Image (tube, rainbow, N blue to C red):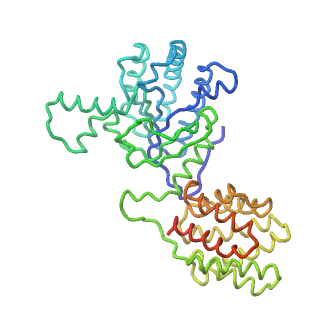
Amino acid sequence: MDKITLPPGTKIPNHIAMILDGNRRWARARGLQPWEGHKAGYESIKKLARSARDLGVHTFTVWAWSTENWERPEMEINEIMKLLRYGLDEMEPELHRDRVRFIHLGSKDRLPKDAVERIKKLEESTANYTDHVFNIALDYGGHAEIVRAINKILDNNLKKIDAKQFESYLDTANQPYPYVDLFIRTSGEQRTSGLLPWQMDYAEYYFEQEHLPDFTPEKLKEAVLDYSRRRRRFGGNDAEEHFKFDPKIVAGLELQWQHALNLKQDEKFRDLVIRYVREHYGLSKTLAKTAGIELAKALVYGRHENWDKARLSLEGLYEIVRKTLGLALEPKIVANIEIDLWKNGVTEEKLKNLLAEKFRVSSFQAAKSAHLGWLASTSDGTDKKGLLEKFYEAIKERVA
């Protein structure tokens, strides 16, 4: 399998945590036994763990078995424990090869003795590795972890501690990145179910419709890109560059250059596009001229269905935007999405993807803008100007 790569400047989460959901549903949909779904999920998580390391993620946490999962049928539990033993044995060479520290989160009391022996062996033999951490939550519950920490504190006869001391009694104690940056849950479920409640207070959430067996490394890349677009303020100020355009001016310029393009008023069209680019992206006069000419050429090429030249011109535009604004966008990706819109028609989903890629916001954050943009693109009446203004207002709400 080829390694997945990310655009230059992508913000990589130090710690990704996943709830591995949907194995049984995946199996039922295919007429298979539940444990066959778990095997498929296991194969998926192997690839995801490797891909996370390849992307530069330091700590990868998977919740494989909760304190409530013991209520499942005995046959299913036995098959899962067999899979656990197999997985622990299989991952050992890879952990040593990639210098990954293996850590068990949760209680060992109810796990099979031979599985516990394997876990302890891996924890001890990888204890000095610092390149990566792989946390596997087994017989884990968020409340149980907090209670476990409190009991340790009581055992040490401590009556008063601060937050830093409390962290040292959690299951993630002494890890370089105990706090989760990106939390992923598969299978369409939208809750944390108590995973790492202390460590997830500032995590970014990413919910995926696909079941775990269908969550590929490429989908992990999409999640990381979505994370990278988000502005993490941690209660403080936004460190990102702010866009200061006036939505009414930008909308008005777009309508004017569209009109000039339709009337083939070449010089007026070019000048309007340059003004539009300068106002929209906040570029200098010189850069706006260069970028605006690239956009104007792309629009004209698009009119004549010369898609390759249109794509190259758009790449030139977005390369200037990327370098000037410091956004971790990938010009080729943005250009390809935009050309697809021009070539095959605007849909709300495609527009959402374009806005997310272009302005480095999450897909969820781009949804309102995409809806308004789609309405504006399908309108040919008097409400078009108002919709276009609202479209740019919604963008500014996200990026200002």
Q: Which residue is rendered at x = 79% and y = 84% of the image?
A: 266
Tell me: residue 97, above or below residue 368. above
The part of the image, by quadrant, that contains residue 306 is bottom right
How many marks can you see? 0
Q: Residue furthest right?
A: 304
Residue 297 percent coordinates (x, y): 76, 75
Q: Nearer the viewer, residue 131 or 379?
A: 379
Residue 220 percent coordinates (x, y): 58, 43
Tell me: residue 97, above or below residue 228. above
The part of the image, by quadrant, that contains residue 374 is bottom right
- Position of the N terminus by quadrant: top right
Q: Which residue is rendered at x = 53% and y = 41% of the image?
A: 52
Tell me: residue 289, above or below residue 198. below
Q: Which residue is rendered at x = 58% and y = 36% of the image?
A: 187
Looking at the image, residue 203 sits to the left or right of residue 79; the answer is: left
Q: Nearer the viewer, residue 52 or 262?
A: 262
Looking at the image, residue 281 sits to the left or right of residue 295; the answer is: left
Residue 382 percent coordinates (x, y): 72, 76
Q: Residue furthest front?
A: 382
Residue 154 percent coordinates (x, y): 18, 30
